Image (cartoon, grey):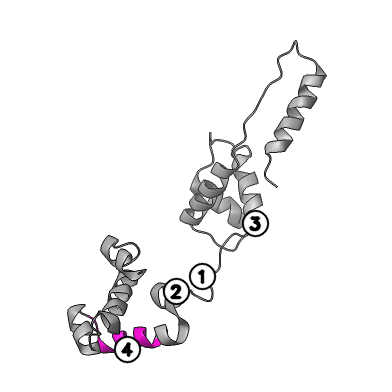
Amino acid sequence: EKLEPLVKTLDGSARKVQRAQILLKACERLGGWTDLEISEAYSCRTKTVENIRFRFGESGFKLTLNGKPPAMPPRARTFDGQGEAPVIALRISEPPKGYANWTLDLLQERVVALSIVDSVSRETLRQTLKNRMTQRKIQYWVIPPKQNAQLAADMENVLQTYLPP
């Protein structure tokens, strides 16, 4: 019941759909193809079909369909939360003399010079700043000069309500 809609709509990765197709063809209620017939129909090895059947029996439906999640990411992150803060602070600070804005090359040199990390690629900096700076947009508000301090206090209370925890 769960596999047929997945196969019909091709919902998911190619591997997930192929595993669903193999499980459907292996189902005895629907005819129960042999491993050789399934491998020929879906252009895969017989061992692949055997592994999928075995995993279904041992680990269950969900793990068979989605595969085993990786134990850890293939590579450690360059910046954690503590490492991102100085980079963002550097980016929003004044650029060096002679420059109107920070460039990725300038940031890369300065981050290494300040020993925030030993080395960093421009792409890592770009992604870090893109992901964090867009989430940390600062919106300013100005109190009209004729308003009183009570308005400022009330607005701060309202803004505190919308701050993330």
Label 3 to label 4: alpha-carbon separation: 44 Å
Q: Position of residue 134 (x, y in %)?
A: 54, 42
What is the chief secondary structure element of the magenta stretch? helix
**Quarter assignment of residue 160:** top right
Q: Is residue 41 magenta?
A: no
- Say which residue label 2 marks: 62
Label 1 crowd (10 A; few <14 / some 14-19 / many >=20): few
8 relative position to 96: left or right = left
- The mark that comes first in sequence, 2 or 1, is 2
Q: Label 3 is placed on what type of residue?
A: Gly
- The mark that comes first in sequence, 1 or 4, is 4
- Say which residue label 3 marks: 81
Q: Label 1 is placed on what type of residue?
A: Arg
Instruction: Give the foreground label among 3 and 4.
Output: 4
Q: Position of residue 148 (x, y in %)?
A: 80, 15
149 relative position to 59: left or right = right
Q: Label 4 is placed on what type of residue?
A: Glu
Name the secondary structure under disc 3.
helix
- Say which residue label 4 marks: 50
62 relative position to 6: left or right = right
- The mark that comes first in sequence, 1 or 3, is 1
- Residue at position x 62%, y 37% in the image: 94
Q: Which residues are magenta?
A: 44-54
Question: Which residue is at the front of the view, 96 or 151?
Answer: 151
